[in-house]
Amino acid sequence: MSIEGIAAAAGVGKQTIYRWWPSKAAVLFDAILESNSFESGVVGVPDTGNLESDLRMVLRGAAAELRDPATDRLQRTLTAEVQADRAIADELVRRLLRPQLDATAARIEEGIRAGQVDSSVDPGLAVELIFGPVFHRWALRTGDLDDAFVDGLLALVLTGLRPR
């Protein structure tokens, strides 16, 4: 992907792209936000009363999004770009990742209140333990990112979260 390629696909000149976005990463980031309807910053996590079921739904959805051939290249390009562009990385966290992570942490807090999760669990750390391996497997292509992986990961993490 290049600015030239983006401009050609849009049927505009390169200067038009740079007028609206400072970099390729900014274009890609806005495309991801728009395609996923995250622009509002409002992210919902299901609350069926069963934390394990709710987290499975969220995690399977995240894994499906990462392995979708229609968005894989775009997401990999953005991931590479944020390594060199701190401003885009900060925007990615603020506008996309933080709302998702916070919503999931809030759902885990509900699980704590409902007695489904040990009260000593840090919801923010639990979220990192849940999503980190999914991103690691996707980014480094260390194995299949399928429902079996997600379910096994979730079972392992939830074992550590359950009340003692």
Image (spheres, grey):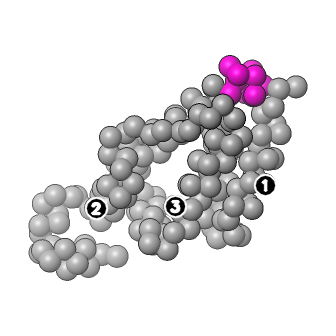
Q: Which mark is residue 65?
A: 3
N-terminal of the pair, mark 3 or mark 1, is 3
What's the residue at 70%, 22% (across, down)? Answer: 114
Task: Check disc 2 and give the amino acid type.
Answer: Val
Q: Residue at x 77, y 43 (%)?
A: 157
> What quarter of the picture does the C terminus occupy?
top right
**Label disc, if present, on residue 137 of the rendered structure:** none
Q: Main secondary structure of the magenta part?
A: loop
Quadrant position of residue 53:
top right
Q: Quadrant of residue 130?
A: top right
| Image coordinates for residue 101, horizontal then vertical, percent | 53, 39
Residue type of the residue flagged with mark 3: Glu
Sequence-wise, which precedes: disc 3 or disc 2? Answer: 2
As shown in the figure, which amino acid type bears the numbered disc 1? Gly
Range drawn in magenta? 111-122
Magenta region includes residue 112: yes
Q: Residue furthest front?
A: 48
For the residues labelled 3 and 1, say whether their Cβ atoms are less than 8 Å apart. Answer: no
Q: Which residue is mark 1?
A: 152
Q: Identify the element where label 2 is drawn.
A: helix
Is residue 58 found inside the magenta-colored segment of the image? no
* Residue at the spot 75% in from the left edge and 22% down from the top edge: 115
> Is residue 125 in sight in this rendering?
no
Q: Residues within 10 Å of mark 1 (few under 14, many from 20)?
A: few
Q: Is residue 160 above or below residue 66?
A: above
Q: Residue at x 16, y 58 (%)?
A: 20
The label on residue 27 is 2
Secondary structure under tag 1 reads helix
| Dot in front, 1 or 2 | 1
